[in-house]
Amino acid sequence: MTFKAAKVVIITEKVILEQVAQVIETFGATGYTVFAAAGKGSRGVRSAGRAAVVDGFSNVQIEVITATHETAEKIAVEVAEQFFNNYSGITYLEDVEILRSHKF
Amino acid sequence: MTFKAAKVVIITEKVILEQVAQVIETFGATGYTVFAAAGKGSRGVRSAGRAAVVDGFSNVQIEVITATHETAEKIAVEVAEQFFNNYSGITYLEDVEILRSHKF
Amino acid sequence: MTFKAAKVVIITEKVILEQVAQVIETFGATGYTVFAAAGKGSRGVRSAGRAAVVDGFSNVQIEVITATHETAEKIAVEVAEQFFNNYSGITYLEDVEILRSHKF
Amino acid sequence: MSRFLVQFQSPALAFLVGGMLLAAFRSKLEIPDAIYQFCVFMLLMRIGLEGGLEIRDAELADMILPAFIALIVGCGIVLIGCVVLAYLPGVKTEDAIATAGLFGAVSASTLAAAMLMLEEQAITYEAWVPALYPFMDIPALIVAIVLANVYLAKKKHGPTAKTKIWPIVTNSLRGSALSALLLGLALGLFTNPEVVFESFYDPLFRGLLSVLMLIMGMEAYARLNELRKVAHWYAVYAAVAPLVHGLIAFGLGYIAHVFTGFSPGGVILLAVMAGSSSDISGPPTLRAAIPSANPAAYIGSSTSVGTPIAIAVGIPLYVALAEAVFGL
Amino acid sequence: MSRFLVQFQSPALAFLVGGMLLAAFRSKLEIPDAIYQFCVFMLLMRIGLEGGLEIRDAELADMILPAFIALIVGCGIVLIGCVVLAYLPGVKTEDAIATAGLFGAVSASTLAAAMLMLEEQAITYEAWVPALYPFMDIPALIVAIVLANVYLAKKKHGPTAKTKIWPIVTNSLRGSALSALLLGLALGLFTNPEVVFESFYDPLFRGLLSVLMLIMGMEAYARLNELRKVAHWYAVYAAVAPLVHGLIAFGLGYIAHVFTGFSPGGVILLAVMAGSSSDISGPPTLRAAIPSANPAAYIGSSTSVGTPIAIAVGIPLYVALAEAVFGL
Amino acid sequence: MSRFLVQFQSPALAFLVGGMLLAAFRSKLEIPDAIYQFCVFMLLMRIGLEGGLEIRDAELADMILPAFIALIVGCGIVLIGCVVLAYLPGVKTEDAIATAGLFGAVSASTLAAAMLMLEEQAITYEAWVPALYPFMDIPALIVAIVLANVYLAKKKHGPTAKTKIWPIVTNSLRGSALSALLLGLALGLFTNPEVVFESFYDPLFRGLLSVLMLIMGMEAYARLNELRKVAHWYAVYAAVAPLVHGLIAFGLGYIAHVFTGFSPGGVILLAVMAGSSSDISGPPTLRAAIPSANPAAYIGSSTSVGTPIAIAVGIPLYVALAEAVFGL
Ligand SMILES: Nc1ncnc2c1ncn2[C@@H]1O[C@H](COP(=O)(O)O)[C@@H](O)[C@H]1O
Ligand SMILES: Nc1ncnc2c1ncn2[C@@H]1O[C@H](COP(=O)(O)O)[C@@H](O)[C@H]1O
Ligand SMILES: Nc1ncnc2c1ncn2[C@@H]1O[C@H](COP(=O)(O)O)[C@@H](O)[C@H]1O
Ligand code: NA
Ligand code: NA
Ligand code: NA
């Protein structure tokens, strides 16, 4: 048996990873997972792996599983409001199914 | 409030990343995100991280958020047709929800 | 035309990647994709990239596309049962759509 | 004058230009990020260790005036930069402040290139001079961040807001560049790293700097694009400011030479530090502390124009000037 | 005694402490993982190559007793550790076994630090001594894994279960640390790597060790947090055990000295190996082989407390003891 | 003949075999990709820098004939390879062309190994010889890509299609290997990198090559599996072709020796280049330019069989031959 849960995905600049993580924890998420990412968006190309003289300017993707769709949406809205005026980034939600044994 | 959108995921050889990105841009996507990946598929194991004497033979995963399911599907079909006869790779779609503030 | 399929996502310790991959193959999956990941969960922070004197203690995320939701769930349950008592990790499922041309 | 010409063939500059050419020809050559980070670490440890070893034997009194000049120059550059940039059309105030901050701060790789050039030209300096780096770098970043915060706070809440300085200082000390430099300094001062310094950090210095210069060149070219998207005045500022800053510091250094016997080589290095703009720890520090400033403006200015000018024109200029002034 | 004090300023220890301080001040300095892995590889190749080159010319008979002592000590430490830890309150049996296993195994970086200290103090040793590493390391890990499996099997199925030893041995030989060491040994024994050894592996040894020590220091501090979450007895064990183990090995080494003329430097290195706890290949081996043991307990003990004590107190202690005993 | 045997213990070969053994025993030792990329960069810069520095002082006229031979050999190997492979059963035409292209191109690591072996044997050569690399490498890749495109175009659209050569040339020059080599050449020719060459690129050459050889060995073993999946004729071709190619180039080099006094060492290096098959930039270039060719076939042949044969048998063979022919 599986249960419905939600996932919020945040793609943004590595330099604010810690701050975003703090926001996520504010909403009581049980954890999060972070990936190094490169990308292209409205604010130009962001590379990864290559020697970046200007460190911290590559992307990270942060994924958070939350028990409810509501929490996921709150995180997405808060992160977008707090950071995406000044930092490049996008955020979106997905539906996921979790196993009974997990608590999120 | 969130809005429905689509995500197309492409996993393929790093060596054709630039070409795939061009196809994606052809369809008017606002951006894309790229991850280094390792994997196993019908065409064998592809490692990452390990010293690969033969560079460019590890995988990348490319994710594109599109406003409509239709665009996502078009990208998937085009990439599969154009590359997957000669290069290893798979592609699939997911439903996502985006915030009102974003335009994709 | 697209077809429904499922994706199972497993986030766990790098040290058991090979064992998890074996479980996945047991269920007849046609392949899987692996990402290096960092994260925070109930069992503390797990970094990636940084010099980890204690190798193998960073995370990996493993994604498997399966033809049926049933197989995906079976893999999730089996991995959780077999590993998550002793190793940190979570697992969840997503619905995806695949192109006709692929066989999973 | 002959020296001036020879320097264009010096390895540091040659690798910098080589990197730019590679990027211009869209070469696929990539130096992995791990190697870049290691090169930076090695350079800063090398500078720090030698500084620490030398400060041990130095008259501390000799250091006071040059350190004070470094501090004054660092802060002064930022203040001048803000005023100048604010006058230029199409320049946002936050961007002006961040750019001035970056040019006030110090580039370890430019400094290292100058150290090697002096060595090649057999011009000596007090070995603790490179250790003045933080005296110029930190104050410059602090002034810029404080100015920006005051400006933004006023814009939002009127003139009552206050900015805390201490967190900015610690944050800046924690950055990877200053951490490595200070660690080296401490190890040089309090322990006995002579053997490892002589067998590892020192001999690899020159070679790793050449790799670093190559990377800086590739990055300089890559960032030109970003610079094109912002007001063209940034490019003008970035081309002129390094030399002006260097000459100001050269003048003040000359005064220290007259009064306290500060070495000609030391005067040159002081000018180089002033003329350089931070590339390693400055950008992320400013990105985090002045989020609304556009990184394309300040990083583009610094990396694409400021650093190449500081190395290719600045260093030979100060050396030539020192030849003329001190009759080297 | 003077030597004891000087050693606190030796580079290896200084970089270790430096790393801890950096982490304590939450510095953002990061040494990339690729560099760490390369440092480890280089160190082990260096140790292996020299060992191989020397074993070629050595009397094999001389090695037998020290190798036997290494084996006995490796196994003995694990057995003692299990008994002692099992008596302590709040300690789970699996965790006790894994911790004892890690302290029985050997740390290449601690060993390398000791080799450099001996070189600085001009204390010689048979060059094959570091090659005794696997004779202590592998048996210790095997004993721990077998004990754990026997214990767990009994808990589950009663006393009939059996553990296969051979897969544990091969798995442990395949680990990155032992692979590099054994490769170096084989290349030293059967081929002519003298030139590359002298031009590359040997001269970089000291410098790369300093980088490694810095990383170990940062990691030691970072893992302290984990250690805090488990029973405090781990910290006590981790502080005392390295010295006890070192002294036991010192005593047995002394016997070898008396009977077969084993060098004082060799006795010291034997003590260092015994006193060290595995940091590179031990942890993942145990994590995979004793999954139910809590890594926070054994890695925390070893990395945060055991290794710093083994380097900062252990090495100077054995050197001082050797001075007293052998009148160096 | 004695030299022939000694070479089996030479470090380059020893590390190559060591890497294969490690992989065969499924060792978990991994050399990070960043280190691999850096080793390659260093090797090519070293070769390029020395080449550039030497071409400055060289009679350009001396280079013409050897460069022409390099070009002829590079193209010739591809043409011969296509014809031969096309005759073999179970071999697809595209795969044949790509494989022949890879064997016509040049391996920097094989070349570097030969340079060290010659140094060990005190056999001298014109220092610009390694700089002939691109004269053989680029034409071979171009011929292969053009042939493949012509073949594929004919298959699809009949015999009217045309292939553009210039994009292939620039693309190949942009590859990481040739970029590094040409950068080194240019820096050596036009600037003064002597000091950094002598203090960094040259002394690290030997050591980094040993690391690279280890990686090549591991990769050779790992790719054997892929080779097993394709027609067995690839393995036969891969074992025989390097030696045939090397001997052809040796013969032509001998002619240059007779007519223009081309050095015996130069003849050997020419043979080594011809006998080597590209491992760094060839594979991705071909993968992108001949997408329908199966990489398991051409990379498997080259990395798993061709390169080990070229190093282990080819180099000693040409040296022995040179001893016999030139009476070294
Ligand atoms: N349509 C998109 N699909 C996937 N990723 C995107 C998309 N748009 C932006 N991104 C990612 O979000 C980052 C920041 O986007 P932006 O703020 O638009 O520059 C980019 O570097 C991409 O990694
Ligand atoms: N069933 C699957 N689930 C997840 N990833 C897959 C799957 N099949 C293939 N892949 C990924 O796609 C890459 C190319 O697949 P292939 O073309 O089948 O060799 C593999 O290396 C994997 O990373
Ligand atoms: N709520 C969550 N959302 C996303 N990832 C998570 C979450 N909880 C745990 N993880 C990931 O799973 C890993 C192991 O979790 P745990 O077993 O809870 O320590 C963590 O390091 C994270 O990478
Ligand atoms: Na400055
Ligand atoms: Na031990
Ligand atoms: Na060839």
Image (cartoon, coloured by chain):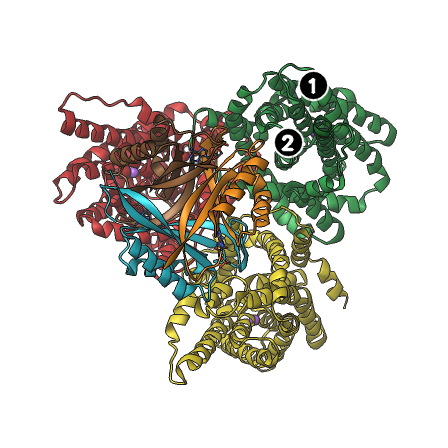
Chain colours: A brown, B cyan, C orange, D red, E green, F yellow
Residue at figure coordinates x 45%, y 66% from the top left: B85
Q: Residues within 10 Å of mark 1 (few under 14, many from 20)?
A: some
Which structural element holds mark 2? helix
Near-viewer residue (A71 or D327): A71
Residue drawn at (52%, 61%) of the image:
F280
Subunit that carries the residue with mark 1? E
Q: Quadrant of residue A61?
A: top left
Asked whether the viewer can see residue D192, the reply is no
Picture quarter with the C terminus of chain F: bottom right
Residues indicated by labels 2 and 1 sit on the same polypeptide chain: yes
Q: Which residue is mark 2?
A: E110
Q: Amino acid at mark 1?
A: Ala
Q: Relative to the observer, which residue lies in front, E260 or F74?
A: F74
Label ID, residue F185 = none
User: Residue D249: x, y in percent?
Assistant: 27, 36
In this picture, residue C78 sits left or right of residue A98: right
- Secondary structure at badge 1 equals helix
Mark 2: C-beta under 8 Å from nearest atom of ligand 5: no
Question: Number of numbered discs present?
Answer: 2
Residue F212: x, y in percent?
58, 55
Q: Is residue F35 above or below residue E164?
A: below
- Marks 2 and 1 sit apart, C-alpha to C-alpha, by 27 Å
Left or right position of B80 against D1? right
Say whether marks 2 and 1 touch (CB < 8 Å). Answer: no
Which residue is identified by label 1? E86
